[in-house]
Image: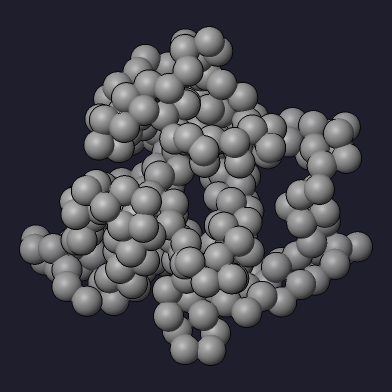
């Protein structure tokens, strides 16, 4: 069942000016790549040069790519890639060894977060995070894991993420161009309790508001399997828009 088809008793419903869905087609992936490249080019122009085409990780087992698209004109407003450790270690594990109490659990890492520079970008980023959280809930993930460079890591501090390696500070990560990042985690099952305990401003948005424009249907992806992955990579060659 699609998340958007659920009916949440007692929840406020909020309609968004954009949709948030899982990428399923080459055309959708091309849009995600376009907004990914343009967003990184604003802050990390050298690294952005490596993001002009889809990456092989975009179509791997255990990976989904989120895409926010304007309802007005269909333009891409934001994207995020989520990888679980169901089939292989997380990308950040190329650079660090996670604590045993985490590596033995179900994890999901968010990478390639990118949003439009337009005013709506702040809302898009919040909805991408909510979709990440919901996807983790839907797939029985225990811990969300991210790597945040300065000053983006402060956003995760505010969401109550915690350092996986307290005191180590910023660690160069291979999958992020060897740029220094903080490795941070967030426990899914205790999220609502922890947000409520501090009267967190995101509590209502995350837990008490239904957004029908967030659609996270994994059924089509799981049914299509290898055929889906091959089509996403254009039959073996990277895609063009």
Question: Quick one: 179 or 160, which is closer to the camera?
Answer: 179
Q: Give the image location of residue 46, x and y in percent.
A: 22, 48
Residue drawn where x is 31% and y is 32% of the image: 179
Residue drawn where x is 64% and y is 33% of the image: 157
Q: Residue furthest bottom?
A: 72
- Quarter of the view holding residue 51: bottom left
Q: Give the image location of residue 115, x and y in percent.
A: 47, 62
In this rendering, is residue 241 above or below 147? below
Question: Quick one: 203 or 34, which is closer to the camera?
Answer: 34
Residue drawn where x is 79% and y is 32% of the image: 194
Residue 55 appears anywhere in the view: no
Count of numbered badges drawn on the protein = 0
In this rendering, is residue 90 above or below 55? above
**Horizontal arrangement in the rendering, residue 9 relative to residue 30 (left or right):** right
On-image quarter of the C terminus: bottom left
In this rendering, is residue 91 above or below 222? above
**Horizontal arrangement in the rendering, residue 196 relative to residue 46 (left or right):** right
Q: Give the image location of residue 150, x and y in percent.
A: 48, 35
Residue drawn where x is 38% and y is 21% of the image: 171
Residue 203 appears anywhere in the view: yes
Q: Residue furthest right?
A: 10
In this rendering, is residue 238 above or below 179? below
Coloring basis for residues: one colour
């Amino acid at each position: 069942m699609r998340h958007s088809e659920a009916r949440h008793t007692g929840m406020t419903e909020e309609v968004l000016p954009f949709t948030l869905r899982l990428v399923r087609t080459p055309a959708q992936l091309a849009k995600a790549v376009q907004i990914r490249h343009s967003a990184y080019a604003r802050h990390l122009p050298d690294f952005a040069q490596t993001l002009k085409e889809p990456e092989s990780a975009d179509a791997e087992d255990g990976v989904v790519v989120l895409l926010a698209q304007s309802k007005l004109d269909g333009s891409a407003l934001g994207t995020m890639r989520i990888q679980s450790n169901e089939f292989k270690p997380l990308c950040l594990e190329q650079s660090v060894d996670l604590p045993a109490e985490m590596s033995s659990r179900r994890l999901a890492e968010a990478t390639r977060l990118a949003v439009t520079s337009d005013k709506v970008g702040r809302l898009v980023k919040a909805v991408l995070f909510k979709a990440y959280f919901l996807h983790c809930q839907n797939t029985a993930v225990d811990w969300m894991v991210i790597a945040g460079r300065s000053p983006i890591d402060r956003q995760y501090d505010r969401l109550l993420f915690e350092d996986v390696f307290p005191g180590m500070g910023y660690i160069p990560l291979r999958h992020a161009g060897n740029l220094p990042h903080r490795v941070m985690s967030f426990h899914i099952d205790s999220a609502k309790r922890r947000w409520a305990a501090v009267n967190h401003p995101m509590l209502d948005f995350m837990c008490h508001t239904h957004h029908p424009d967030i659609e996270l249907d994994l059924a089509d992806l799981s049914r299509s399997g290898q055929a889906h992955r091959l089509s996403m990579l254009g039959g073996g060659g990277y895609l063009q828009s």
